[in-house]
Image (spheres, rainbow, N blue to C red):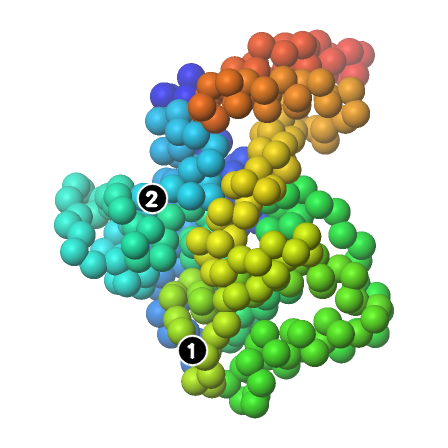
């Protein structure tokens, strides 16, 4: 089933929706003055994510690849954007699966332009958005809505005397905001080496050095993309796998996951652990489940 060409639809409709990048090729919120190449590249950025998840399902790869894959699906323009060199592209469509991209600071969704650009502003990064995305989307944590009346951060980092991180830390010092920011902001700080359209950098638009060292809420010190990856796949491994299972199950059933689905989620996670995290193990657990087999019957009963 996963070898069927139609699995691309699963990549687009499930994975891209889960990661909040569905329809990314139409994103028009970037400053042309700061990022003149973005509009031309956004279609390729979206295609990368779609091809990544199409391959993940079709090749029955481990779920952990979502975070730490050492490969990426690129075309020449996107490889140039990422600084990936020494790669040959062949084939009619000009795309290729490039191995060994970790040495270029790539690999997995944390380093894809779609996720990095979507959770950024028009002309600058927004660690709060990126951190919240990691917390809610990848780990399934629910955070309260921000209180009313909290001032917005300045938009143009090049015009500021402080770095985006310094501005964010000053903003998060508000007692009304501190509790949530302690949970989410460190994840965003770890990704500050990527600009608002996903390019690697060591300085921001104002020429100030970026700092990717941080301490998460449980006291663990992490540094940059590699530190965040390692933390998510070790300390937060169970939460990440549970969230993947929850989102995949909800998509397969066409409804929100209920309390009665918890045993199935536990079974899915156990199957993953027993079978090398193969994504197919989670899919098989779903299609063999009572919930999935009775979808048509429940729909018919509701119509009657």
Tell me the CA gap for discs 1 and 2: 25 Å
Residue 244 left/right relative to 178: left
Q: For this rendering, which residue is in front, 196 or 255? A: 196
Rendered position, 116 above or below 35:
above
Rendered position, 120 above or below 44:
below
* Dot 2 alpha-carbon crowd within 10 angstroms: few under 14, some 14 to 19, many 20 or more: some
Residue position for label 2: 70
Q: Residue at x 47, y 83 (%)?
A: 208
SS category of the residue bearing label 1: loop
Residue 192 on image: x %, y %: 50, 67
Rendered position, 271 above or below 153:
above
User: Is residue 81 among the parts visible in the rendering?
Assistant: yes
Q: How many marks?
A: 2
Residue position for label 1: 203
Residue 65 on image: x %, y %: 42, 38
Residue 4 left/right relative to 159: left
* Dot 1 alpha-carbon crowd within 10 angstroms: few under 14, some 14 to 19, many 20 or more: some
Q: Residue at x 52, y 66 (%)?
A: 213
Q: Quadrant of the C terminus?
A: top right
Residue 247 on image: x %, y %: 62, 33
């Amino acid at each position: 089933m996963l070898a069927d060409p139609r699995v691309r639809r699963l990549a687009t409709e499930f994975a891209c929706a889960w990661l909040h990048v569905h329809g990314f090729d139409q994103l028009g919120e970037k400053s042309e003055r700061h990022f003149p190449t973005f509009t031309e590249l956004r279609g390729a950025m979206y295609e990368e994510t779609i091809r990544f998840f199409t391959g993940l399902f079709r090749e029955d790869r481990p779920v952990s690849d979502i975070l730490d894959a050492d490969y990426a699906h690129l075309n020449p323009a996107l490889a140039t954007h990422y600084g990936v060199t020494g790669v040959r592209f062949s084939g009619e469509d000009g795309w290729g699966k490039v191995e060994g991209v970790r040495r270029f600071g790539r690999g997995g969704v944390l380093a894809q332009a779609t996720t990095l650009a979507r959770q950024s502003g028009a002309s600058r990064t927004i660690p709060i958005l990126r951190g919240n995305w990691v917390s809610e989307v990848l780990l399934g944590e629910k955070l309260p809505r921000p209180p009313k009346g909290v001032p917005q951060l300045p938009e143009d980092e090049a015009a500021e005397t402080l770095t985006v991180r310094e501005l964010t830390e000053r903003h998060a010092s508000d007692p009304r905001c501190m509790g949530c920011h302690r949970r989410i902001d460190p994840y965003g700080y770890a990704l500050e080496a990527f600009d608002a359209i996903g390019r690697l950098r060591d300085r921001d638009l104002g020429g100030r050095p970026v700092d990717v060292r941080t301490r998460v809420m449980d006291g663990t010190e992490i540094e940059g993309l590699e530190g965040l990856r390692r933390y998510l796949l070790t300390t937060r491994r169970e939460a990440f796998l549970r969230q993947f299972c929850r989102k995949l199950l909800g998509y397969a059933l066409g409804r929100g996951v209920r309390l009665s689905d918890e045993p199935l989620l536990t079974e899915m996670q156990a199957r993953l652990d027993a079978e090398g995290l193969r994504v197919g193990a989670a899919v098989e657990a779903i299609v063999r489940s009572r919930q999935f087999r009775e979808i048509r019957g429940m729909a018919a009963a509701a119509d009657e």
